[in-house]
Image: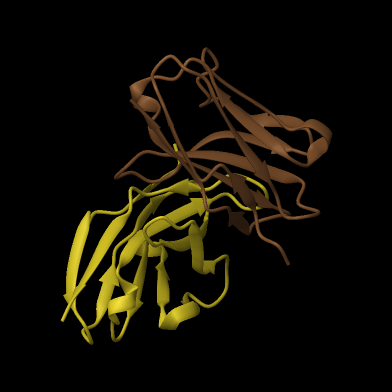
Chain colours: A brown, B yellow
Amino acid sequence: EAGVAQSPRYKIIEKRQSVAFWCNPISGHATLYWYQQILGQGPKLLIQFQNNGVVDDSQLPKDRFSAERLKGVDSTLKIQPAKLEDSAVYLCASSTGTDKYFGPGTRLTVT
Amino acid sequence: AQSVTQPDIHITVSEGASLELRCNYSYGATPYLFWYVQSPGQGLQLLLKYFSGDTLVQGIKGFEAEFKRSQSSFNLRKPSVHWSDAAEYFCAGSAGGNTPLVFGKGTRLSVIA
């Protein structure tokens, strides 16, 4: 069974630029999560989708972050404009229930 | 609010020694509890999980964890550490189902010869 795929694996941008991350969940997984993991901290939930609908985006900085999951499969997370404090690893996870499966993450560096 | 606390930021153990990583939780009801491991540049790998039943759960790579309701703890243990166990370990909790995981800040494990 293929795991959760994410791309790119690494991205370096300057502040005020925009960036997008892509996630392909495990086939058949209706629930998809985006987490932000700042260096030295545990992952923090940004947004949760159930199929193509948003379940929880209460911790998503909506002035600069946006996410979508068209057709209830792949998802993209966008940051525009990026700030220095957005430097982090962005993790995507999917699930059909209690067990969550994580992708390898995208490491973003904002200079 | 639901929370998970890992009191130790960094632990160093000698290879072959025993290991215990601490985790405390704060949930209204019995949470679903997990331990994940993250090696540098890698994603999160599930070591073990507790939902109900036997409070001592076995996981992969020789790890086990014990759920103690009276202490609100879910500590991770391994009787003999290998150099390859050096990594970041995260304790996480959820309310079950598709509710998202809430993570602790992690404990970095270093293994010395």
Q: Position of residue A50 (x, y in %)?
A: 74, 38
- The residue sitting at 58% across, 44% down in the picture is B100
In-front residue for pair B57/B38 = B38
Q: Position of residue B78 (x, y in %)?
A: 33, 80
- The residue sitting at 33% across, 44% down in the picture is A41
In-front residue for pair B17/A26 = A26
Quadrant in the picture for residue B20:
bottom left
In the displayed structure, B77 sits above or below A11; it is below
- The residue sitting at 36% across, 70% down in the picture is B76
Q: Residue furthest right?
A: A71
In-front residue for pair A109/A53 = A109
**Does residue A105 appear in this view?**
yes
Q: Position of residue A42 (x, y in %)?
A: 38, 46
Quadrant (top left, top right, bottom left, bottom right) of the N terminus of chain A: bottom right
Relative placement, left or right, of A89 versus B5 is: right
In the displayed structure, B49 sits above or below A18; it is below
Q: Position of residue B56 (x, y in %)?
A: 46, 78
Quadrant (top left, top right, bottom left, bottom right) of the C terminus of chain A: top left
Relative placement, left or right, of B59 versus B80 is: right
**Does residue B58 appear in this view?**
no
Relative placement, left or right, of B16 versus B61 is: left
In the displayed structure, A13 sits above or below A108; it is above
- The residue sitting at 28% across, 86% down in the picture is B80
Q: How many marks?
A: 0
